[in-house]
Amino acid sequence: MYEVSCGWQGDMAFKAEVGGHEIMLDADEAVGGHDQGPTPKPLTLVSLAGCTGMDVISILRKMREPVSWFNVRVQSDLTGEHPKTYTNIKIIYEFKAADGLKDENVRKAILLSQDRYCGVSAMIKKATPIDFEVVYL
């Protein structure tokens, strides 16, 4: 069983404990916070980026692909009405110095992550479509 704890720190701040690590959550001053940490909703996108990023690196290592620099960005819009939710999520997988990196293996690793391994992606896909793009810098 997984469990996280999120303790109120006053005003709009909460300290989350996740696997022995702490994350401070807060809101901006316009809604009573002090901007001491991220708001909760974007952490969903962080979870998606981290989950698929770890998968892709793991798969590419097994394929013996020479990844020297890798970054994952996630973009989405919000609905206008409450409860505001993410729409049309796009994951951008960025690679630098991609000499020797086979595009077909990169795309295969991404698809394996998206379709088979990333549990965060699997959960989010039930509510919002996810698309991706590969960028070689």
Image (spheres, rainbow, N blue to C red):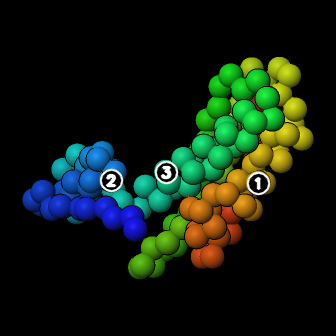
The amino acid type found where label 2 is placed reads Val
Q: Secondary structure at mark 3?
A: helix
**Residue wearing tag 1:** 112
Question: CA gap, disc 2 to disc 3?
Answer: 14 Å
Disc number at residue 79? none
* 41 over 123 or under it: above or below: above
The amino acid type found where label 3 is placed reads Val
Residue 25 picture location, percent across and down? 27, 54
Residue 31 picture location, percent across and down? 22, 63
Of 21 and 91, nearer the camera is: 21
Q: Is residue 29 visible?
A: no
Disc number at residue 46? 3
**Which numbered disc, 2 or 3, marks the residue closer to the eye?**
2
Disc number at residue 18? 2
Residue at 21%, 54% (x, y): give it: 15
Of 35 and 4, nearer the camera is: 4
The amino acid type found where label 1 is placed reads Leu
Residue at 63%, 67% (x, y): give it: 122
Of 2 and 81, nearer the camera is: 2
Q: Secondary structure at mark 1?
A: helix
Q: Mark 2 and mark 1 in contact (Cβ < 8 Å)? A: no
Query: Quick one: label 1 or label 2, which is nearer the N terminus?
Result: 2
Q: Is residue 67 left or right of residue 85?
A: right
Residue at 61%, 35% (x, y): give it: 71
What residue occupies the far front of the structure in this picture? 1
What residue occupies the far bottom of the structure in this picture? 82
Q: Is residue 113 visible?
A: yes
